[in-house]
């Protein structure tokens, strides 16, 4: 599907979510735009040495993209850069977290469906991951906000089957059920899994915050819980999200090894 039904060139404020090589020298970009939602475009010659579109076709690039409609995709003719989110590119861990977040944004949103809040929300989340002292907590906060925007936010503390408050640990969670379920109801859901009640309480509190905290307990376990939730609802492999979980585990293992005997 073409990104535009018009034959005239048009411009969009956009963030590059993902890129893939196309042909000998082109790149296909997935853009999240403020005006048209998610669209696919082609940056011709972006892989050639000295191409003016090379840096603008990198994931996490933000700018005004001037596009010319084609039969299948729109083509990038010019880009006015706004931000490259340099702080993410200069920190390996923050880069991994940002790419994992963009993966979720990409897979959870269909093409050509405008969402007025999403573009601003995604930029706010990436800036938080770039600048907050605790990027893991910023990512967790951003994922919870994305779940709310997508309309698939879980009920962390109220049983979706009985309406009872969370009062047991470990507690059962079921994506099919929509969140926390009591033990008496757990056998009804094949996708159930157990989580410490502390994690569910923390996720509930974090989902209500207007900005990410500087400290947050059990970030890895919380991200693993959200990973299972995303896997269920997107029904897709999430390689970038899995990579960040592996990286957090490596860091935790290294930190433990450095502790004095």
Image (cartoon, helix red, strand yellow):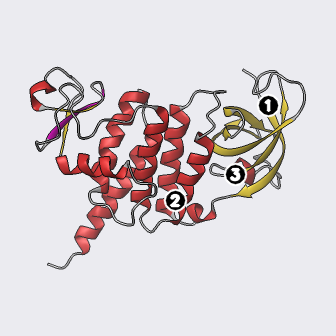
- 1 vs 2, front mark: 2
Q: Is residue 45 visible?
A: no
**Which quadrant does the C terminus fall into?**
bottom left
Task: Give the image location of residue 99, x and y in percent.
Answer: 52, 49
Spatial CA distance of label 1 from label 2 is 31 Å
The image quarter containing residue 9 is: top right
Label 3 vs 1, first from the N-terminus: 3
Q: Residue at x 72, y 36 (%)?
A: 35
Residue sitting farthest toward the bottom: 260
- 3 vs 2, front mark: 2
Q: Which residue does the numbered mark 1 point to in the structure image? A: 74
Front residue of this view, candidates 85 and 138: 138
On residue 128, the disc is: 2
- 3 vs 1, front mark: 3
Q: Residue at x 24, y 49 (%)?
A: 201
Q: Residue at x 11, y 44 (%)?
A: 169
Range covered by the magenta-colored residues: 171-175
Q: Quick check: 71 above or below 197?
A: above
Label 3 vs 2, first from the N-terminus: 3
Q: Which residue does the numbered mark 3 point to in the structure image? A: 62
Q: Is residue 57 magenta?
A: no
Marks 1 & 2, CB-CB < 8 Å contact? no
User: Most prominent secondary structure in the magenta stretch?
Assistant: strand
Q: Quick check: 184 above or below 211?
A: above
Label 1 vs 2, first from the N-terminus: 1
């Amino acid at each position: 599907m073409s990104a535009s039904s018009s034959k005239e060139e048009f411009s969009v404020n956009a963030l590059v979510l993902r890129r893939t090589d196309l042909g000998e020298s082109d790149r296909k970009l997935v853009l999240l735009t403020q005006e048209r939602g998610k669209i696919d475009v082609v940056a011709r010659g972006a892989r050639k040495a000295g191409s003016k579109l090379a840096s603008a076709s990198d994931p996490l690039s933000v700018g005004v993209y001037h596009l010319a409609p084609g039969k299948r995709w729109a083509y990038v003719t010019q880009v006015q850069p706004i931000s490259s989110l340099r702080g993410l590119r200069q920190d390996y861990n923050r880069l991994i977290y940002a790419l994992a977040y963009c993966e979720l944004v990409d897979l959870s949103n269909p093409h050509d469906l405008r969402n007025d809040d999403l573009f601003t929300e995604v930029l706010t989340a990436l800036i938080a991951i770039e600048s907050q002292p605790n990027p893991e907590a910023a990512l967790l906060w951003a994922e919870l906000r994305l779940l709310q925007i997508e309309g698939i936010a879980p009920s962390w503390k109220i049983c979706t089957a009985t309406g009872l408050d969370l009062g047991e640990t470990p507690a059962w969670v079921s994506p099919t059920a929509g969140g926390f379920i009591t033990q008496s109801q757990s056998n009804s859901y094949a996708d159930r899994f157990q989580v410490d009640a502390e994690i569910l309480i923390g996720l509930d509190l974090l989902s209500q915050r207007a900005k990410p905290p500087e400290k947050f307990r059990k970030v890895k376990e919380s991200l693993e819980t959200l990973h299972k939730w995303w896997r269920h609802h997107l029904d897709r492999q999430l390689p970038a999200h899995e990579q960040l979980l592996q990286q957090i585990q490596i860091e935790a293992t290294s930190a433990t090894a450095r502790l004095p005997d």
